[in-house]
Image (cartoon, rainbow, N blue to C red):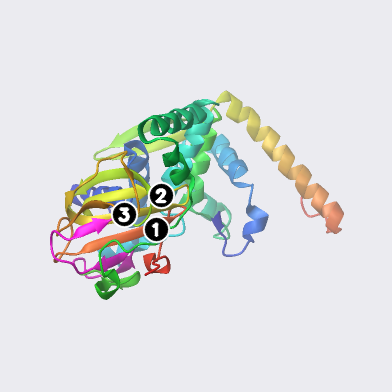
């Protein structure tokens, strides 16, 4: 059993959507996942979709982004003793020059993303966090965030202070999305947007408008898909909402 | 760190590097998936390495200069093979000695029947 080029492309794109952004590492893990899928399919018991879902279970406890993070940390700490410190010092100095010393204090303040990403968000949740049948793929799969049913063009707010880490567009996944790093522990992700109002590296305050909702990517109607990461793993965003 | 259908996670913690290095000393070059399969086979399914532990360990050993890697292109896929460097080969002996000393010590402390040579 050998996977077709289309199947390999599908897995490759999916792995990228799951946070494997380093090309070299993604290609290495892609081969591993392909081997797992081929192994699952070899008896003729499972279809490609089923085999892929089963292969992903092998990685469930250590999601791809976390594996990538661990490896990046290893590479940085081995490459040069002071590299990491120099990068940190320079960026702190830059932030201080641009935003003043108070910005440093704000960055240092640890706070989980507690604001709702849309106004009256609690009333608008259409799909919660956890296992569900995927609306497009029609298989039981983990829903990694919370969906808010909002019309296209609804303002999206940063749910805590932080720095814009990623601005990207994945046609078959999150569509236009933004990822914010709040501190060493927390990150939040806003997907299926129509428009960005920030760029990578921007410092945002809790409640700032970062973009507008839409229907881009794998989406069956206008909504905001919102995720929260704690130490690299997705957690239920609802646990942090203070409103 | 590991999925261990039979052996406790705590017992196996810290043995991952030793396992990787020893396997590579016998197989010249291996890729990640092959290592997981080989461990499953040798341990008769009692130890199964998780990918989340294996890949960081491989990259760490490579960054420390114990392993080198080479890429083989198979159509659209890229297979990354790891093999031991000279330093890596030397380390295998040390690691195995360390582990066998540890086992002997534990046998003495726990007063077990000596089953290992």
**Which secondary structure, mark 1?**
loop
Q: Determine crowd level at label 3: few under 14, some 14-19, many 20+ residues with C-alpha closer than 10 A.
A: many
Q: Which mark is residue A158?
A: 3
- Mark 1 vs 2: CB contact within 8 A: yes
Q: Secondary structure at mark 2?
A: loop
Where does label 1 land, which residue?
A113
Q: Which mark is residue A241?
A: none
Labels 3 and 2: the sequence-earlier one: 3
Q: Position of residue A21 (x, y in %)?
A: 32, 42
Which chain is home to disc 1? A
* Residue B6 is a magenta residue: no
Neighbours of disc 1 within 10 Å: few (<14), some (14-19), many (20+): many
Q: Residues within 10 Å of mark 2 (few under 14, many from 20)?
A: many
* Same subunit, tags 1 and 3: yes
User: Which residue is drawn at the image coordinates 59% and 42% (left, top)?
Assistant: B17
The answer for which chain carries disc 3 is A
Observer able to see residue A49: yes
Quarter in which the N terminus of chain B is drawn: bottom right
Dot label at residue A182: 2
Label 1, label 2: how far apart the Cα atoms are: 8 Å
Q: Are discs 1 and 2 both within one chain?
A: yes
Mark 3 falls on what kind of element? loop
Question: x%, y% of residue A174?
Answer: 23, 55
Query: Range of the magenta residues?
Result: A136-157
Q: Real-space Cα distance between discs 1 and 3?
A: 8 Å
Classify residue B73 as left or right of residue A149. right
* A221 relative position to B39: left or right: left
Q: Position of residue B57 (x, y in %)?
A: 53, 42
| Pick the front one: A117 or A28 | A117
């Amino acid at each position: 059993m050998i996977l077709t080029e289309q199947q390999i492309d599908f897995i490759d794109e999916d792995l990228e959507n799951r946070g494997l952004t380093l090309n070299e590492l993604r290609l290495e893990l892609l081969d591993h996942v392909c081997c797992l899928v081929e192994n699952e399919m070899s008896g003729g018991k499972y279809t490609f979709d089923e085999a892929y879902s089963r292969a992903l279970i092998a990685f469930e406890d250590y999601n791809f982004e976390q594996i990538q993070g661990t490896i990046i940390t290893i590479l940085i700490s081995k490459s040069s003793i002071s590299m990491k410190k120099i990068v940190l010092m320079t960026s702190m100095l830059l932030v201080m020059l641009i935003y003043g010393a108070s910005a440093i204090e704000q960055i240092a303040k640890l706070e989980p993303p507690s604001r709702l990403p849309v106004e009256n968000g609690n009333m608008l949740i259409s799909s919660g966090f956890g296992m569900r049948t995927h609306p497009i793929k029609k298989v039981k799969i983990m829903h990694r965030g919370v969906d808010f049913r909002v019309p296209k063009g609804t303002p999206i707010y940063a749910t805590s202070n932080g720095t814009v880490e990623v601005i990207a567009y994945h046609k078959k996944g999150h569509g236009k999305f933004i990822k914010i790093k709040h501190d060493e522990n927390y990150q939040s992700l806003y997907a299926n947007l129509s428009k960005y109002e920030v760029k990578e590296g921007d410092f945002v305050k809790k409640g700032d408008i970062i973009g507008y909702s839409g229907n881009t990517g794998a989406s069956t109607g206008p909504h905001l898909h919102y995720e929260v990461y704690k130490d690299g793993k997705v957690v239920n965003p609802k646990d942090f909402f203070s409103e | 760190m590991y999925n261990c259908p039979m052996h406790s996670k705590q017992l196996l913690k810290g043995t991952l590097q030793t396992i990787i290095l020893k396997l590579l000393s016998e197989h010249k070059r291996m890729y990640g998936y092959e290592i997981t399969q080989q461990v499953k086979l040798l341990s008769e399914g009692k130890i199964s390495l998780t990918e989340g532990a294996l890949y960081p360990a491989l990259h760490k050993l490579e960054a420390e200069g114990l392993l080198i890697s080479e890429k083989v292109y198979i159509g659209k896929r890229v297979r990354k093979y790891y093999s031991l460097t000279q330093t890596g080969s030397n380390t295998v002996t040390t690691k195995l000695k360390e582990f066998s000393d540890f086992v002997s010590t534990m046998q003495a402390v726990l007063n077990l029947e000596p089953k290992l040579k």
